[in-house]
């Protein structure tokens, strides 16, 4: 099992959700994060003048998938999250040793 | 006639209370949109305070209440407040300074423009909104105010009753909102059913509370004197608001659950509906008027949704339809026992009063819808009404105003 | 006696200000609960605006202020505002329209019901609260208002002084809150010491600010005329609020740190305590009354916590005890030099005034506690007072109202 | 002269409206700081309501308005409100109770102290602020109020016009803010350019809305009677606010984008500038006065930033400079046609009026800056003005008050 | 070392905290996340009518434990977070290469 | 590749950002979390009296780095986040199997 952690633009959440459903993953966990990268921040306005904020709102989408689903899932996210502009985000693949479904206590493959 | 200090105090306080309603609208609307458009929505109301506040004293008051030209519009005699001083006007509100009457009316013009913005939140270009607002004030609000309230206005001449602005403020705003929303088109994702959850319902509730408070100035202040009539209008206002809030709560409970958003909306619908009637009907008639408003507006929102029109915050259903019902109800429930300057309605043996009421409603519906359509199209042609899709997804707070509601936090 | 325009304007403005206090309570309470119950807490106050606003004009005013029946209750002559018109009442407030007096009183009834809800937040079933509220208005508020303020009421007959509602509003609400909280039982986790942090203290502060503002209408408006007495009551109100806010700040500083929550609470305690006294005492007496209120209420909250009773937002300690202290203090500090319709108190050589004051306090304590206990038990039997444990853990916003305070965000 | 009920009602309502401005300041400032200092910033205003509310009735009113001593200060005759009763004062506001005049003035003193706090947010020690506030009220506000408004004050004697507090309130607060901010030094990270994003701009906007509303009481209430003059001041106030809000929007648009924060700030600048002029100028002159204020204050903020002074919320630029411009503008635009108790200004052929205006401005600048410097240094020596670096990084809400704005949530 | 990431119901936090203490883990990191899974969302109300929201508030509890503590920790969380209803959440076990205690600079076993 | 997850004090964010830049990492993802550990919580005040809150606001900083950069990055964070007081936080190093840059689709080393 792998955990796919995708840092995406806020406005791409709906397409990413749909793309993951298409490859068979409905379950996921999402959190609000702030990121910086090449995008370099935005400038906001004070009463007068401006100031730069280097952390931009992003969403982190976490999906735990079977090993064999990693490639399709990565493809689904990459396609659906992409705008082609700087700041589209990154995906990281992290090994998962085990999973448990709390409701049933099932673990391993049955838990995801 | 000399100035009466008590009447002046009452109208000044009422003016301040109506002024506060515009920040109230800012909260009421601002809390209902998504977080990324919170400030831009509030900004639309605050901009009205600045823009309309200026245009009104420059020429708006004159067009609306200046000496009559052909029953259609006021003359330019009061440009820049010329002749508007501490003495009473010869024709309006004879016991208070002309300036007091003028500023009370200013607050009405401001909030009317602010009300419309609920239809176009989350996608209109701010520059376009400002230009539209200025044109709308000039070409829609001022004439309609003159027709109904101006000395010599043709709807006043017909005997149409509108105590505090059911037609001038609410029908005009609501119908124009619908017209403009159709031109502008729906928000991205609206057609696809993306949920657009209100971002901050407590703010909606504070906004509604402030509106309810200010509406006493709006309606009871419209007596323009302090005394029995103001008291009667005050009580009618509170009863209608209570009846509508309660009814809306019950209706949504029957459908599923009673919501704070519903109670807030219901209260506003009840306040809208009693507006034209407040000083003409027996206060207890606030019950049928308010309860009726809740029913009618509730189902008009459903209807609007079924039509698939993104008139986003239901200015049409609440103000347009609420105002229409109120203007009509005035023709039913009015009685000269409450206000000798009014008329008897259907219930008091005078079904004919429904005629001028209907004429007033029809005239304002047709004119407001059509004129707004033209103005909207013109603005769209010249500067474009909508932000770009990218600006819309990012949100108007950042894209139009370079700000965000909750900064300082990490996100 | 003819209507005096200035008095009418003053009472109407005061009525609007008291109306705004109920949204103020919504914020004050709403900010003190956990986020998941923010809307449901606000809803309780907004529902009072609808429900009590209606019941009051239907029959509540008549039961309270209708022609006396056996010194206990008013008659039904004013049902549906019959006989309540633009002319002054023959017995109350002879310089303003009867309607103005009626609506001023309406705002008192509304806020009293809203105040009680602080005791039962985060766990009461909304339907049960509504039924309880209607019954409480009918069987507790209306009789008590009649006793104290009604023409012929027995407590008024004894000479008990209550300028603006220390007994009628605050003792009645506070003691009933305690009674109902005991029946209802504590919130899940309360006994285990789960911290129940206030979710939004800035809202509590705004609420307190609005309450302070509105309280000028509450207390100074209770003069029912504009002039010296209203001014005196106004000043006493501000002094007491300031003294209590400051004292509470100092007390909590001595204990550990001065808090905004404490200042807000202190201000409210001071406003409560001055309520019965405002128009009977020399304004500077606001200092001992307010400072005393802060002391007494502060330690009553501690005491309530030690008893382990989850009277969640301390309606009893702040309103019940604050009102009791205020009613008692009226018997100490009152002077006919301020209000010839009042009486001298202990300090002015008339210790006997403490007797009717004590009688009034005792009567309302016993009656409100007992009657609320009966009503609470009845409602519990018929529809059940509490939500299910699952609904309580999820929060009342979702479970009772299908809404959440900050939507649109991911969470 | 007997009390006039209408004037009393007007001044009482105005007093309540001015009282509400202090919670308005709490929101306006609170929304502009970082989340971790939200409560502490609001607390500074709420503490003024308590502290100044008390000191004013104890001795502040007496020092300001007591019988003149050497044109410099009032005598102690009114200590603890001695001689301040329901009858009118022999020298001030002859148609309303002395108590009403006193409490109207109390609200001015309270808000003036609250205004200063904008300069020192996010780093001042709360105990030091309280001590400073009490001293500042005593040694700066009371003398200046006496000079300008006290019967026998030397600036009044010179003929300096200040209708509603341009010098007494705004210049005094703004200049003192600058002085204190310099002593206190910048927030940690200010020099390094750490962005200090406003934490909650909707609160800033509500605060501005409440301020605008309350300012009608502030300015039009300063007529102390209801009628033509109050109406004129009311209209001037609204026009100036609108003009300044609009102008600020345009200026920031030219620079980059129109912001809600800018509109809110602009409105306040316009309200400040019209304050000394409101009852002396023709209302339409609110346009140049307001627009001028927006220009001048906007660039003064830029200038202040270039100087690298952390006068955090620009009390100096908005109130100090806005008030200075307004006091000067009064000398330009005043006309006896509006207020026979006033004077003609430059525009009406009397350039000499600029002399007393300039004298008033200069006197208050020098005195407020210097006296605040001394008081600030004294307080710094005795208890230390600043919190420790660790307390500052953690935030004042936790370190000074043991609270946090949004609790209950996980963070 | 392993990182245990448990996605639980908000209202189960207190029991989970206590259960982890019982197996010897006091330290933990918690974040507010939104999840979807079989539970399928809730329907909320607009002024009129309803709409569905498919992301539900959950909490993510992260505890880094010694390898030998994984099984007891999983058991503790599973038992204490369970209600038996759909939506109880999931636990993932993720390998951790190293840990550092910032205050002391200690790493490895001593850091946890 | 490794993901470095550092739980730090809120007020140390700026130094940590700068320290990571110095070792060559500009991109990072940050989230607001609540933690408990030896620090034991703070006590807050109610209208009267106090109550303890055991979860304290912390920030989680996530940076994915090349294997060879783990040691310098750990050092940079440890030095810049340290105050020496209890509650300075912890850093965990977690293996990453793969990374994708969404904008370009690049994966592996090129993605970070
Ligand atoms: N090394 C990294 N470790 C963790 N998160 C990163 C890293 N680099 C980038 N990110 C995250 O990815 C987001 C997008 O990165 P950015 O460089 O702006 O876009 P792009 O991938 O188009 O160059 C950032 O906002 C940040 O949240
Ligand atoms: N594949 C997944 N990857 C990451 N998180 C998941 C995954 N599936 C479920 N979750 C998380 O677990 C939570 C509970 O899952 P759900 O399916 O509703 O419960 P149950 O385990 O009882 O079937 C979801 O809200 C989501 O946060
Ligand atoms: N075992 C753990 N698993 C996950 N997070 C932890 C663990 N122990 C501590 N933390 C996180 O580290 C933070 C700091 O830990 P703490 O024990 O207070 O500091 P110190 O490292 O100085 O002893 C905690 O607030 C928590 O977020």
Image (tube, coloured by chain):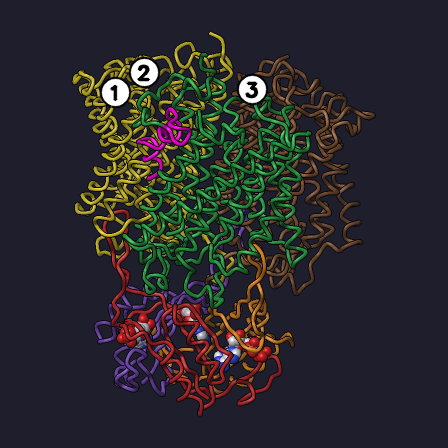
Chain colours: A red, B green, C brown, D yellow, E orange, F purple
Label whose residue precedes the other's in the sequence (2 or 1): 1
Would you identify the image quadrant in which residue B270 lies? top right
Residue at point 58% right, 74% down? Answer: E39
Please state the chain letter of the residue tagged with numbered disc 2 in the rendered image.
Answer: D
How far, Cα to Cα, is label 2 from label 1? 9 Å
Report the residue that reaches farthest toward the bottom: A68
Same chain, labels 2 and 1: yes
Height in image: B405 above or below D140? below
- The one nearer the camera, C133 or D36, is C133
Residue position for label 2: D339
- Residue B203 % position (x, y): 48, 49
In which quadrant will I find the C terminus of chain B? bottom left
Same chain, labels 3 and 2: no
Residue position for label 1: D334
Please state the chain letter of the residue tagged with numbered disc 1 in the rendered image.
Answer: D
Q: Can residue D331 be seen in this snapshot?
A: yes
Q: Label 1 near label 2: C-beta < 8 Å? A: yes
Would you identify the image quadrant in which residue C369 lies? top right
Checking the image for residue C7, the label placed there is 3
Report the residue that reaches farthest toward the top: D1
The secondary element bearing badge 2 is classed as loop
């Amino acid at each position: 099992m792998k955990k796919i952690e995708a840092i995406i633009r806020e406005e791409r959440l709906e397409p990413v959700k749909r793309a993951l459903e298409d490859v068979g993953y409905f379950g996921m966990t999402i959190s609000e994060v702030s990121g910086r990268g090449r995008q370099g921040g935005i400038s906001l306005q004070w009463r007068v003048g401006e100031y730069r904020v280097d952390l931009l709102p992003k969403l982190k989408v976490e999906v735990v998938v079977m090993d064999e689903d990693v490639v399709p899932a990565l493809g689904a996210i990459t396609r659906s999250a992409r705008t082609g502009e700087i700041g589209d985000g990154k995906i990281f693949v992290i090994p998962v040793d085990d999973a448990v479904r709390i409701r049933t206590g099932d673990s391993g493959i049955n838990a995801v | 006639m000399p100035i009466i200090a008590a009447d002046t105090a009452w109208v000044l306080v009422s003016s301040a209370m109506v002024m506060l309603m515009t920040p109230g609208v800012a909260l009421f609307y601002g809390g209902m949109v998504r977080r990324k458009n919170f400030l831009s929505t509030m900004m639309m109301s605050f901009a009205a305070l600045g823009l309309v506040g200026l245009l009104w004293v420059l020429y708006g008051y004159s067009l609306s209440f200046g000496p009559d030209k052909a029953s259609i519009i006021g003359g330019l005699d009061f440009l820049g407040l010329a002749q508007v001083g501490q003495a009473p006007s010869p024709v309006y509100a004879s016991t208070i300074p002309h300036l007091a009457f003028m500023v009370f009316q200013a607050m009405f013009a401001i909030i009317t423009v602010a009300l419309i913005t609920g239809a176009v939140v989350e996608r209109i270009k701010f520059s376009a909104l400002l230009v539209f607002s200025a044109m709308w004030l000039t070409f829609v609000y001022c004439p309609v105010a003159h027709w109904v309230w101006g000395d010599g206005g043709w709807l006043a001449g017909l005997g149409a009753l509108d105590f505090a602005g059911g037609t001038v403020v609410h029908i005009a705003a609501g119908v124009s909102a619908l017209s403009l929303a159709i031109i502008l088109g729906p928000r991205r994702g609206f057609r696809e059913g993306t949920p657009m959850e209100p971002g901050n319902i407590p703010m909606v509730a504070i906004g509604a509370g402030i509106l309810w408070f200010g509406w006493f100035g709006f309606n009871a202040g419209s007596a323009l004197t302090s005394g029995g009539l103001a008291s009667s209008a005050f009580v009618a206002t509170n009863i209608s608001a209570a009846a509508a809030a309660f009814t809306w709560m019950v209706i949504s409970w029957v459908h599923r659950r009673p919501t704070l958003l519903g109670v807030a909306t219901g209260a506003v619908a009840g306040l809208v509906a009693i507006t034209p009637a407040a000083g003409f009907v027996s206060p207890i008639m606030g019950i049928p008027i308010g309860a009726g408003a809740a029913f009618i507006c509730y189902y008009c929102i459903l209807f609007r949704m079924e039509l698939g029109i993104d008139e986003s915050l239901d200015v049409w259903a609440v103000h347009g339809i609420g105002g229409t019902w109120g203007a009509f109800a005035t023709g039913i429930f009015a009685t000269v026992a409450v206000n000798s300057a009014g008329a008897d309605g259907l219930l008091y043996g005078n079904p004919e009063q429904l005629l001028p009421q209907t004429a007033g409603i029809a005239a304002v519906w047709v004119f407001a819808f059509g004129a707004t359509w033209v103005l909207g199209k013109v603005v769209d042609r010249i500067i474009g009404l909508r932000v770009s899709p990218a600006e819309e997804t990012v949100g108007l707070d950042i894209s139009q105003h370079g700000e965000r509601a909750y900064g300082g936090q990490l996100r």
